[in-house]
Amino acid sequence: MDFTEELKSQFPIGKFLKPPLLQSSESILGPLFFSPKPETLTLLSSSKTLCPHPLFSPPPKLTLSRFLSTSSSSLLPSTSTSIASQFDDVGTHQHPNGSLSDQDYNRLRLLYCPLNNTAIAFFPTGDNNDQLGFLVISAKGSRFDVLSDEDDAVFTVVNRLNGRIRGILVNPVEEFYSAFQGNSLVNVGYLLAFTMYSVHWFSVKVSKASESTTKPVVSYLGFKLFKTCSVVGACWSPHLPEESVVLLQSGDFFMFDVNARESKGKRLRVSWTDDDLSSSQSCAWLGVEFSWHPRILIVARMDAVFLVDFRCDDCNVSLLAKIDMLNLYAPVEKELFHAFSKADSDGFHFVLASDSLLVLCDVRRPLMPVLQWAHGLDKPSYIVSFRLSELRSNSRDNRFEWANESGFGIMLGSFSNCEFSLFCYGPSLPGQGGPFASEISKIFKSLYAWELPSGLLLSGCDCQCGSCLVREEFSKDALPVWIDWHQKKDIVLGFGILNSNLSALFHEADEFGGFTLIRLMSSGKLEAQRYCASWDPIKKFEPAHGASMLHFENNLLCCMGGMDYRFRKTYKYLKFDYLSAHLGGNLTELLDSKMKNSFDGLQQKCSLSIEFHEILCEKLNICGFSRFRTLPDISIVFGDISLPSSVREVALKRIWACSPMELLQLAFSRYAEILEVCSDEKASLEFSVVPDLPQLPPFFLRKHFCRSSKWSQKFQRSDAIVGPVLPLPILVTLHELQNGCPYSQEVGKFSSEEELNIRCDEVMQVASEMAVSDSAAKSHNDHAVSLADDRDDLWVDSQKSKPFIWYNPTAFECTMRDDNRALKDTVFSNFISKVPERPSSPKDKADGIALNLFDDLCPIALKYDDCTTNITPPELKTFNVLKRQFSRWQDGFSPYRDFCTRFNLKKQRK
């Protein structure tokens, strides 16, 4: 079936069995697969300064809302979710694919110097990657010779940039022979480096010394700081080597001339339409490139590409490509452009990479792709094009000279994923389609894909066979969650292809040609390796087959801390055998075995003094414990509720209240006696003092001890009672072993968590009968047994209002949608609060002391450490004014009104 040229381009290569724009001919095209030659791997340099410090921060393991809710107890879940939603929008605008912008750029740039046949490798270095480093690569016989600084360190530019480098660009100067005289310095190129908010320019000069290679001179030309908007990218002009253009995230352009006296640059006014500006708020800009004219630019955004023409006074903007033009074979609602580059063929073509397609476009054919490939890569972020003659240089076989001079190759991939592919294309093959088709192709210059895309082993040390890929994925999954797999793999951070003239000095000619790759590794190595063209793709790379792709040593790719640790490193090893047994459900067995082995010794050693026994009993009785009882009345536990408490907290109070005194003596102790148990004098132990107020554990709002195990003349040891020093699951299990089944053969059937669940069911059953219940607060166990007999008649008197409310805080409603079992459990999300028996009034005074002055400011009862406050008449007058203002705010606050209405609570007024 014959198609028009426009219709043919709508069929992506890789989506169809026989796409119309795919051509294949081994006799004309030659081999288009490239494989590394293991014997040519050469280490050029290995230094910490090549990769001195972490290159990017580790990706967060928690979402922003989850981080805020877990790291700050003062933020409600609803507040943290609201804050996170605003920041998530900003992050989506900048990095919709979730990748880090400073991670997926090429950190290595090569500048070829034909005067002395050397190549200068530029890369970021310094403590914060804020300096330019470079090495000089030359030939010494048939071997590589690398010129470096003292002690094999890299050369560095003195000037530090004001931020981490996010891009390096070089632009060679070709017409310099007339300016060269003797050993004088000659400018061979320019260099541009940009950070997030600044752009810096340098000139590179060399001296043609006949005896040996000398260090090039990198001169600082100037910089431009952008204070209000970040830098997206920049580009050098291929027409005028001194000119460059910078693109900002706001869509503004600045043009600079390095030879100009003033480095402020010229702002290029762009007349964006309202639709373009509104779209730029939701889609980030990708980059800018020069087109066929020095005043015509191609600028790409994640949803569109524009041609910006500055030849006239009024700037003209036209649309070249939109993400909608890929709607035939890509889900447009999820598709975005992620990489953009100018094609190496001429000034008319450019390439775009979306989530699923690689698209070659022509500025002369707006909104119409020239070629499309289904790339099959995960989040591609870097793209670069070469002539096929650069990829198949130094060849012994000249049969494919036409393909070398006519074809092009596009490398697409991601440095973070260590995955790259090569896409070859060119004009129609000669002799195919008859003389008429050949004449048409000459006029319209149609382009075709040459063979299917092929994978490219950029690192040269990985095997891409199925078994090795599966083994690598299993190794990544086996790593702990706090370790990023990038730390365990030596990945490529940047690469460049060595000039063919210089490469010919190191390697003999291959049968079908090849190229020499210079790459920068995350381990701090600069390597060179030869790639040769072959007929077959690499199915199994023998040198790396079966070897582990993840290494034990860190490659310092992720930031794990700041500067060097300045203090003495002392490691303390703690045994968590009890915690491990509790989490695994084996706490009963562990305690049983421990007690069997050490029971005799404990009987002899554990003897409390009568004095301490009396002090401890008095202290615990003040807190609400009773010495001679088994299970307390539920009314005692509910009467102890002073703050809004969850069902689990009330259940814990009930368990603490029913614990016998001989068991509580193990949970509470004098602080001085704890230090005697600790064998390490340097260990720091912190326990909170038991409060004097009548309240059951867990104790809230109490002060911690002022000192730990290190004392001074100002802070002496105290005999205060602290605790609990043993966790409740251990005490409950000890109680069961002592009274239920001591040293029995069925100890594994008891579980402290099951005991706690039973108490939670009892509390929820009682709360449902004696508390005003919210519709959102529902029991999680339909088999709970009623405990009405355990309560006084006060609780079940239908004539009296219920003294408690049982509700689910609205702050938990948004969090309940998350897949978090703890928050879904009603014992955590349902709260019980006490209602005041009567509205208090600030008029209740005795001798100038106001009683319960703040009770009527809250619809639930709160218990303070000190319920009486000395107050003067002027203070009382000021308080009444503030109270009226607060009361008016309560009346206008809808959540408060709804809360009072829902539970039939009276709003107090002055």
Image (cartoon, rainbow, N blue to C red):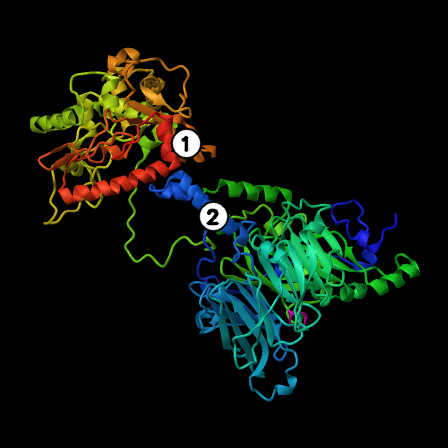
* Residue under numbered circle 2: 86
Query: Is 144 positioned to the left or the right of 825 in the image?
Result: right
Q: CA distance from mark 1 to mark 2?
A: 23 Å
The front one of 160 and 805 is 805
The front one of 880 and 625 is 880
Residue 622 position, x and y percent, is 14, 27
Magenta region: 499-503
- Give the quarter of the figure containing the C terminus: top left
* Residue under numbered circle 1: 823
Residue 501 painted magenta: yes
Q: Secondary structure at mark 1?
A: helix
The front one of 19 and 736 is 19
* Label 1: how many Cα within 10 Å (few below 14, some 14–19, many 20+): some
* Label 2: how many Cα within 10 Å (few below 14, some 14–19, many 20+): few
What type is the residue that disc 1 sits on? Leu
Query: Is 20 positioned to the left or the right of 826 in the image?
Result: right
Residue at screen point 81% across, 52% down: 8
